[in-house]
Image (tube, grey):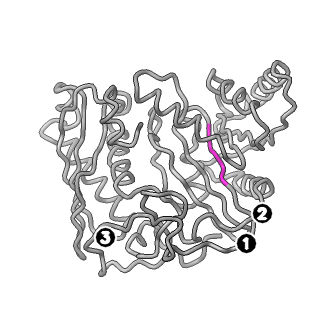
Amino acid sequence: MLGKNRVSFFQCLNLSYCKVLFVPQKEATCRGEAKKQQAPAQPVPMIGNPMDEETPVPTTEGRSGVIAVIGRTNVGKSTLLNALLGEKVSIVSDTVQTTRNVIRAIFTEDRGQLVFLDTPGVHKAEGEMGKNLNKMARSSVGGADAILLVLDASRKSWQEDEGWMRRLMKDDTPCILLFNKTDLGTGFIASYKELWAKVAEEKECDLKPVWLEASALKGQGLSALTDTLFSIVPDGPHLFPEEILTDYPRKLNMADVIREKYFERLHDELPHCLAIWIEDIEETPAKWTIQAVVYVERHSQKGIVIGEKGRLLKSVQYQAEKELSEMYGVKMKVKLWVKVEKNWRKNFFFLKKLGYA
């Protein structure tokens, strides 16, 4: 669907026309031919004003719409979108709060364009950051053309699943309930449907969802999902130029990749107390040097993220350099500094700086 000659979509960040409509103050990422020897001396252009005459206006006709992807944490929302687009647009981890921002993933093909909003997973929130992430996820539903509630078919329903069902019944937005992780089992599908029927009866709601099954990890059921979504979204022009796969800012994406590498090694030991901030990106045709800060909440946590004799820090740097080099098509050098920002998860201004508030 995306073309035989596609290269990694992060490579075309150097193209000057990669502007995104309707989403001010974001950097765009697109697919196309990369020119590594012409790495820009300046950062990638910010998104232009929608009314700017130089901004290319997408005119391709077909079906087009915005789909809010919702669900509790760890049901596979990010894995699903990565599988649909065939590229990694969102980091993946079994840790709660892996996704901390709303990420737009843009799927374009002959039938039209689907703009997915990958939201933070709703979970039992503790502290300001958790509450902000839940609020961010719930607010994403408003204004969407369709809502995709992702459920874990291999595990019993949680309170958050029922909460989302109740939220969906507040209006008549078309919705799809997708049973993901069917490769791990399907034994709880009937109980989810019974839960929907119970809530619908209580709410006296006759909203009829579309029930689908898939395994994002195995790539199963994705065609049926896109077929259904294209049948739901309205007729209209593309919302974004067809080259764009995400409008997620480059610095946030780089920070997420570094954070993912820590998640893979620390698991439940520390991740919620850890944040990454990209201070600077020095770009040359041969190499990009990324200066990043690893924030923790207490001095006792510094030793954990550095590791014995600095081994963990060096390992994270190496793995991040490897993945970012593949994404952007240029050699990367990642330099990490560990700093303490006491109780940063309770600091509104710090959360705002990181994009979590």
Q: Is residue 343 left or right of residue 245?
A: left
Decide: is 272 above or below 63.
above
Q: Position of residue 200 (x, y in %)?
A: 82, 25
Q: Earlier in the sequence, mark 3 or mark 1?
A: 1
Residue stretch in magenta:
66-70
Q: Is residue 99 left or right of residue 196?
A: left
Q: Position of residue 136 (x, y in %)?
A: 52, 37
Please identify, in this view, whether the residue under mark 3 or under mark 1 is nearer the observer: 1
- Residue kind at label 2, given as amino acid type: Asp
Is the N terminus in the top left, top right, bottom left or bottom right quadrant? bottom right
- In contact (CB < 8 Å): disc 2 and disc 1: yes
Residue at horizontal 27 percent and vertical 47 percent from the top: 316
- Residue kind at label 3, given as amino acid type: Val
Identity of the residue furthest to the left in this view? 309
Reading the image, the residue beneath label 2 is 235
Most frequent secondary structure within the magenta stretch: strand
On whether residue 69 falls in the magenta region, the answer is yes
